[in-house]
Image (cartoon, rainbow, N blue to C red):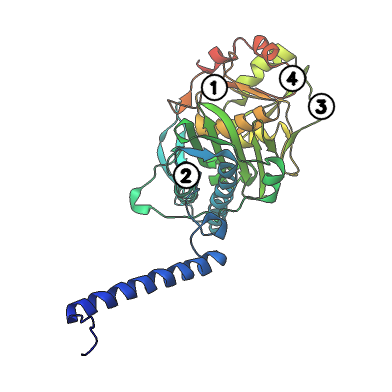
Amino acid sequence: MAPMGIRLSPLGVAVFCLLGLGVLYHLYSGFLAGRFSLFGLAGEPGGGVAGPAASADEGTVDLREMLAVSVLAAVRGGDEVRRVRESNVLHEKSKGKTREGADDKMTSGDVLSNRKMFYLLKTAFPNVQINTEEHVDAADQEVILWDRKIPEDILKEVAAPQEVPAESVTVWIDPLDATQEYTEDLRKYVTTMVCVAVNGKPVLGVIHKPFSEYTAWAMVDGGSNVKARTSYNEKTPRIVVSRSHSGMVKQVASQTFGNQTTIIPAGGAGYKVLALLDVPDKSQEKADLYIHVTYIKKWDICAGNAILKALGGHMTTLNGEEISYTGSDGIEGGLLASIKMNHQALVRKLPDLEKTGHK
């Protein structure tokens, strides 16, 4: 009698073969994934693949990473500013009038710098609010990736990540500060700036000078690559002010501090803040106080405010009130900036400056 056997139908054979192929595919694909991950090709952050900053929780951002990207954005924007200025083709136009009646100018340098800075930050941190001086045209959208590298000077000062809720963060970009001076080829006044505020308080500031390629940055309770000078003259200070209203400040400053007070007219809020610090740039003038008496936009001052705060200095309205970097994009109360001085005593000495600014 012949032995009994198991007979499979053609359909059964086909199913059996498909199951076998599935097992082999699963095992082989797992083997390849392991090989790829060994060489950093699996898309993990450690592999250096550019992409959005990946916090453990998408609802948070790391301030140390934000500082690294902010420095890179300011430099990239500065490259555009310098390239356009050196081409001498600015495509200058007016956006309208300032409150003082001057032309509010815009150039290709402003537009191209803004595009690089905005999209670099937006791609890296898509969940944070970004406010910028220039309009962002969706038709010009770019995906500008960050390589996820944090510079050594930042790692040295900020040793560990600092996570904060993304919804608490507001970024302020000034893609070209001192546009008027830029059109006049007064290059030393020109800066690009990025500021990060958390719950309205400035915590990261970057000021970059495109034409000398100097960059100052600081994080409140973190570290900085810039410092205050060793001494300041509080009795007869050198006061840096806007070129457009130097005479107005000089009159009141002379009444307050005496005729020996020196007024330094300058362009650009970023330049004026750097005038208070120990900056290794031969073109940078030195001052003891920075006073502004008219309306000013927050993207002009946020980065400087953060840097001064990180170094123990102060920037307030002329009435001594802290400036909140949420809500409206400007402040009405003028400003006073100082470092290593009794700031509130200075506020009390200057009671009439804000009224003077509104005349």
Measure the alpha-carbon separation of dots 1 and 2. 24 Å
Q: Tell me the tag on residue 341.
A: 4
- Between circles 1 and 3, the one closer to the viewer is 1
Q: Could you tell which of marks 4 and 1 lies nearer the N-terminus?
A: 1
Judging by the rendered image, the residue that carries numbered circle 2 is: 125
Measure the alpha-carbon separation of dots 2 and 4. 37 Å
Q: Could you tell which of marks 2 and 3 lies nearer the N-terminus?
A: 2
- Between circles 2 and 3, the one closer to the viewer is 2
- Between circles 2 and 4, the one closer to the viewer is 2
Measure the alpha-carbon separation of dots 2 and 3. 39 Å
Bin the neighbour count of mark 3 within 10 Å (Cα to Cα): few under 14, some 14-19, many 20 and up.
few
Judging by the rendered image, the residue that carries numbered circle 3 is: 231
Q: Could you tell which of marks 1 and 2 lies nearer the N-terminus?
A: 2
Say which quarter of the image contains residue 65: top right
Q: In the rendering, at what x and y percent does residue 357 appear?
A: 54, 18
Q: Tell me the tag on residue 323.
A: 1
